[in-house]
């Protein structure tokens, strides 16, 4: 009662003293320092004087009283009768301490005086600082497991909140989120497969039953603030959520990929299934489409359109070494016509700069043969990130090192040209082939300017005269990105693809196609690669067997062995079967070009060709060629297969290195 009424009415000291003496109590022992604060009106109440005189407290009441007195001392509300007083450590900020640090000091001091109160105040302070900074975006992440075409089952324990700096690349933030989900899921379901980036589909969540598929571009290009803007312009979030910088995202993994062996339901999966209110299907339709219809509703939603588009990707780097070392180099020019690849160093080639990490990022080396190895280092050229490599075989002469690098780049260019022909062939046959490419776009073959002993070759422990290098686009290799995947061996195709492994089936079919396209003159082997930011498999460091011995090459016997091994499983490969690969042949007639209207191929006259007009069953496919030595597309009846006899690459007087399929033109001798 005293706590509630103290200070409300003025007290009269004579009346109080009279009352206390009547009660036979000592005023100071009953109400220490408060004997003069009893309101006069209280004594008009019947029995009040007796109750005050017999005032007693329990231990519980005393504890409450003590706590209330403690709060009263630090209260900012002066109506309780006393001015606010603070401990000296809370009153003054020491010199040199920032405002934010001062608040933390006060919170710690308060926690000593009143244990437990600081936790809530710390959380409030952190939230306030985040709002003041305005540089973090709150991401609410959930995990779902898809079963069938549309059904998604939520994993209730897999829900987390991640605060991301708004200027971070989306690709990196998504990698962090996947790592957090993977770590939590591995603890709950140790039997589950590891979650990689390529296994995940990403959905923008509006409500517990409404979510929309995000495209690969949405979660790979730009910064996380660009993703926030995309959410807002597509109306995935309200204006209030946009201003609060909050997005809700669901990561979905197919059950058969998460539990490939058992196929059983995870104990973590909720029995509640999420209605399939998604835009498009799991193949990746864009949320930027003009209209979006909820599958669970018969009514079309309002048309959602926006002129907003993701900005051009900013410079985004996979890693930031402590420092960079700058080198000057000149690059080769490359000309690709059909399968003819020409490399030369222009006499007036401009000097360019390459930045190589001072910590010499190791661990990315990829064996390219039994005898040699390329050590790959992270480098930057302009605004692009590259993997830069030189030969690690210190026994090689300088010229041989340069030749091998030229041959490697040529191999990749030829592979990419034939790959495009393979995809065109599959399209003509109405065969759906998963995308893969050779990582040759933007590749650079360069020569470092002579430097002192500290240049790149010396730093790698290589001879100082190794100036040539090859640089290809850097591919993701974080813990959530799959490591290098190998699809074929050096001597043969390796094991046939598992059921449902369409990517391996496609690459095996491609090797078969290459043999046919080059007239048994070339087969790619040791095909391996990594997924790029768009989720496309990029083949790196391909090897080959050929009739002209490019480098580390088994020649015609190795080609025949490779083909024989593939033919054992060719009929079981759905792509080879649909294309009818074993009946596919190519027209190796001399092209009708403006400069050359006649002549044979590699010394094979047209009289040597045994044309079979009676057996048109094998499929004949024409090769598309450039105007110089490239294929004309035309239909014709079956001809006997010719063995391509392409000569070794030669260097002409102008310093051009030329190689390719088919035979070089008459200007090469």
Image (cartoon, grey):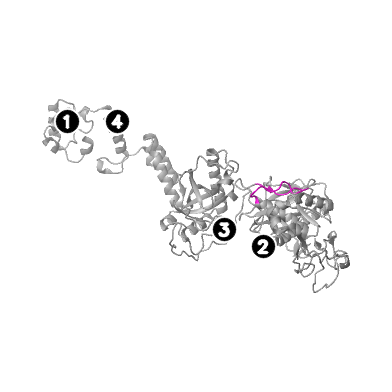
Whether residue 303 can be seen here: yes
Q: Which residue carries the number 3 mark?
A: 217
Q: Please state if 94 lies on the left or on the right of 416 as rendered.
A: left
Q: Please state if 302 lies on the left or on the right of 454 as rendered.
A: left
Q: Please state if 391 lies on the left or on the right of 79 as rendered.
A: right
Give the residue at x 14% y 36%.
42
Image quadrant in which you'd find residue 34: top left
How far apart, in angstroms, are the residues tagged by discs 2 and 3?
25 Å
Q: Secondary structure at mark 4?
A: helix
Characterize the local packing of mark 4: few (<14), some (14-19) or many (20 or more) Cα atoms within 10 angstroms: few
| Residue 63: assigned label | 4
Determine whether 17 is above or below 573 in the image: above
Residue 488 location (% of width, % of height): 73, 49
Q: Which residue carries the number 1 mark?
A: 52
Is 64 within the magenta? no
Residue 184 location (% of width, % of height): 53, 41
Q: Of callouts 4 and 3, which one flags the residue occurring earlier in the amino acid sequence?
A: 4
Q: Nearer the viewer, mark 4 or mark 3?
A: 3
| Residue 427: assigned label | 2
Please state which of residues 539 and 46 is positioned toward the viewer in this rendering.
Answer: 539
How far apart, in angstroms, are the residues tagged by discs 4 and 3?
62 Å
């Amino acid at each position: 009662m005293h706590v509630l009424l103290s200070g409300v009415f003025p007290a009269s000291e004579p009346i109080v003293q009279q009352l206390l003496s009547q009660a036979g109590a000592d005023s100071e022992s009953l109400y220490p320092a408060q004997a003069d604060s009893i309101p006069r009106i209280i004594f008009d109440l019947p029995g009040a004087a007796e109750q005050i005189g017999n005032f007693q407290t329990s231990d519980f009441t005393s504890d409450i009283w003590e706590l209330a007195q403690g709060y009263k001392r630090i209260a900012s509300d002066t109506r309780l009768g006393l001015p606010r007083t603070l401990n000296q450590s809370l009153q003054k900020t020491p010199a040199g301490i920032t405002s934010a640090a001062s608040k933390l000091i006060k919170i710690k001091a308060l926690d000593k005086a009143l244990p437990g109160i600081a936790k809530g105040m710390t959380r409030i302070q952190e939230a306030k600082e985040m709002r003041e900074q305005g540089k973090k975006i709150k991401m609410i992440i959930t995990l779902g497991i898809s079963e069938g075409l549309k059904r998604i089952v939520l994993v209730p324990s897999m829900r987390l909140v991640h605060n991301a700096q708004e200027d971070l690349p989306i690709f990196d933030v998504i990698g962090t989120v996947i790592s957090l989900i993977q770590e939590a899921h591995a603890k709950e379901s140790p039997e589950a497969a590891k979650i990689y980036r390529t296994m995940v589909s990403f959905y923008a969540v509006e409500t517990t039953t409404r979510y929309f598929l995000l495209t690969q571009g949405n979660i790979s290009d730009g910064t996380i603030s660009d993703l926030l803007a995309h959410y807002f312009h597509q109306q995935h979030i309200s204006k209030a959520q946009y201003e609060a910088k909050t997005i809700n995202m669901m990561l979905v993994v197919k059950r058969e990929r998460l539990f490939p062996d058992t196929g059983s339901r995870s104990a973590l999966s909720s029995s509640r299934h999420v209605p399939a209110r998604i835009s498009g299907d799991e193949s990746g339709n864009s949320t930027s489409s003009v209209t979006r219809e909820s599958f669970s509703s018969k009514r079309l939603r309002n048309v959602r359109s926006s002129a907003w588009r993701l900005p051009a990707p900013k410079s985004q780097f996979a890693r930031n070494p402590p420092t960079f070392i700058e080198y000057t180099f000149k690059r080769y020019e490359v000309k690709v016509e059909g399968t003819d690849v020409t490399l030369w160093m222009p006499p007036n080639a401009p000097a360019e700069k390459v930045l190589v990490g001072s910590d010499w990022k190791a661990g990315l080396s990829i064996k390219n043969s039994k005898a040699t190895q390329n050590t790959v280092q992270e480098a930057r050229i302009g605004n692009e990130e590259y993997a830069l490599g030189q030969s690690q075989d210190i026994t090689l002469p300088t010229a041989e090192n340069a030749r091998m690098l030229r041959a490697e780049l040529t191999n990749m260019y030829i592979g990419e040209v034939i790959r495009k022909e393979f995809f065109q062939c599959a399209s003509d046959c109405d065969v759906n082939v998963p995308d893969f490419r050779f990582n040759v776009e933007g590749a650079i073959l360069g020569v470092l300017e002579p430097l002192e002993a500290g240049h790149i070759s010396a730093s790698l422990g290589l001879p100082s005269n190794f100036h040539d290098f090859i640089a290809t686009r850097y591919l993701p290799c974080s813990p959530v990105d799959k490591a290098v995947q190998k699809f074929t061996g050096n001597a043969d195709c390796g094991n046939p693809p598992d059921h449902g492994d369409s990517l391996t089936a496609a690459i095996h079919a491609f090797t078969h196609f290459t043999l046919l396209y080059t007239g048994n003159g070339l087969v790619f082997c040791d095909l391996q690669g990594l997924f790029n930011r768009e989720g496309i498999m990029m083949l790196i460091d391909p090897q080959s067997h050929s009739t002209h011995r490019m480098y580390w090459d088994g020649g015609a016997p190795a080609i025949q062995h490779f083909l024989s091994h593939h033919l054992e499983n060719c009929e079981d490969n759905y792509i080879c079967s649909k294309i009818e690969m074993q009946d596919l042949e190519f027209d190796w007639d001399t092209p009708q070009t403006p400069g050359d209207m006649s002549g044979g191929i590699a010394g094979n006259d047209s009289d040597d060709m045994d044309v079979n007009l009676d057996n048109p069953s094998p499929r004949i496919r024409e090769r598309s060629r450039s105007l110089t030595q490239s294929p004309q597309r035309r239909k014709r009846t079956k001809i006997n297969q010719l063995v391509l006899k392409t000569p070794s690459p030669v260097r002409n007087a102008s310093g051009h290195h030329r190689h390719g399929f088919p035979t070089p033109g008459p200007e090469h001798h």
